[in-house]
Amino acid sequence: MATIMKTIEGSTCGCDDPDHQTALISIDEALRRILRGTQAVSETELVPLAQASGRILAVSVRSLGMVPPFDNAAMDGFAINTAELSGEGPWTLAIGGRVAAGQTPMEKIPSKSAVQIFTGAPVPDGANAVVMQEEVLRTGNSIHLKRRITPGTHIRRAGEDMTAGKIIVPAGRALSSRDIAVCAAAGHAEVSVTRRIRVALVVTGDEVVQQGHVRGAAGIWDVNTPMLAATVNSPDLELASVDVAGDTRAALRAQLNALAQQVDLIVTTGGISVGEEDHVKPALSDLGATIAFSGVALKPGKPVSFGRVKKACWLGLPGNPLSAFVTWQLFGTAVRNALAGQTQSRVRRRNVVLPRALHHRPGRCELRLARLAGFDGSGREVVDFADATHSGRVAQLLEMDGLLFIPADVETLPSGALVEFNPF
């Protein structure tokens, strides 16, 4: 028998169980603290619609007029006055004019006549229906109808799509091509959006080596910097700085202090544990930073931390690349949305079915890599998954589509169980 997991509500993952709370906080509590501790950027800018994709709308968009602005034909055919179809058919009407899209129609349709009309053309005064050209027989300068036409047939009424002054795209929405289409239809050439969020990346670790440099026997390639830089280079974010952390507390303190004056968000990778070589939190403490949380009941990514230093937000990601990837997906997205004032977002998480039993060590909510695997016989979406989570491995990312949310108290989920899935 299949096990049905908790209904998706907001960002709930099931890791709020008090039995699993120690010094670590839940994912949900971490997200709440990010929301409380982040003030949206107030500066805005006007951008042309063609450049607005992915930007966060700062001012709601209202329709500048009725859409469509006038009654118009939905089909190629003939505009008629149905009141003149008296008695039993068939009926014959003289063709009393012609109007194409973009042309001004005659003032009034002639009596006992039809006006040839094309899709999008204004409907002449006095006409109350459009007959498709396929439904009439044209002979010379007349048309013949065999079927009575209902008033309103094939007419798009003025204002049926949008009324003047109505909010059509609310502020706080990440603009997609669909939103841009609506804004264009409403008569707008540009929109007011939140300015791009300025982000600085700071990578820590003496063992981390940039690609293209000589790697010593104890060195490892830097995965986090190019990975996060690729994420940050998006329409709503601006990668303002990429730096290697200073190798002393004093050097890192000076580095973070300078960045806090220049950017909205500082993202560090690694250096947030409590070892002698972990200088990030001591340097932040020297600067009087406020730490909202340090450690989440999560696998992978337990050390993830968040706070504020000067006017900037700080997000401390773990150094292991998969942990950094997962925690950016979860918490980095939350910080960027809060900074940009994004309040209208799509719910991406959904329930999926497991094709086989899943085993998990209770204690922390786990985000397990998973890939879409089609649908079962009942039409439910199925995902296969990695057998374990390894925070230092990234090769599997190529074949994965998202993350399964495994509640903290779960030890085994049987084949056919429903679980929450968050696509990348």
Image: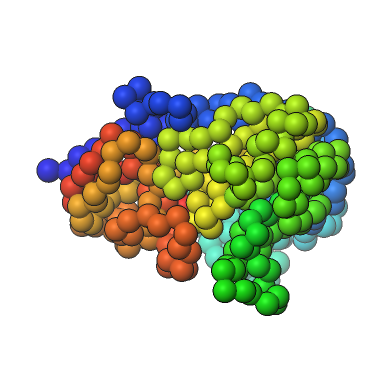
* Residue visible at 60% across and 44% down in the picture: 276
Q: Quadrant of the N terminus?
A: top left
* Residue 69 can be seen, yes or no: no
- In this rendering, the answer to whether 358 lies above or below 337 is below
Judging from the image, the colouring scheme is rainbow
Q: Residue furthest front?
A: 276
Picture quadrant of residue 349: top left
* Residue visible at 17% across and 43% down in the picture: 2
On the picture, is 23 further left or further right than 108? Answer: left
Picture quadrant of residue 60: top right
- Expressed as whole percent of the image width and height from the top left, the position of residue 199 reads 75, 47
- Expressed as whole percent of the image width and height from the top left, the position of residue 173 reads 67, 39
On the picture, is 132 further left or further right than 63? Answer: left
Q: Nearer the viewer, residue 120 or 422?
A: 422
- In this rendering, the answer to whether 225 lies above or below 324 is below
* Residue visible at 73% across and 48% down in the picture: 248
* Residue visible at 61% across and 59% down in the picture: 224
- Expressed as whole percent of the image width and height from the top left, the position of residue 71 reads 72, 43
Q: Nearer the viewer, residue 353 or 332?
A: 332
* Residue 282 can be seen, yes or no: yes
On the picture, is 402 further left or further right than 230? Answer: left
On the picture, is 390 further left or further right than 82? Answer: left
- Expressed as whole percent of the image width and height from the top left, the position of residue 26 reads 45, 30
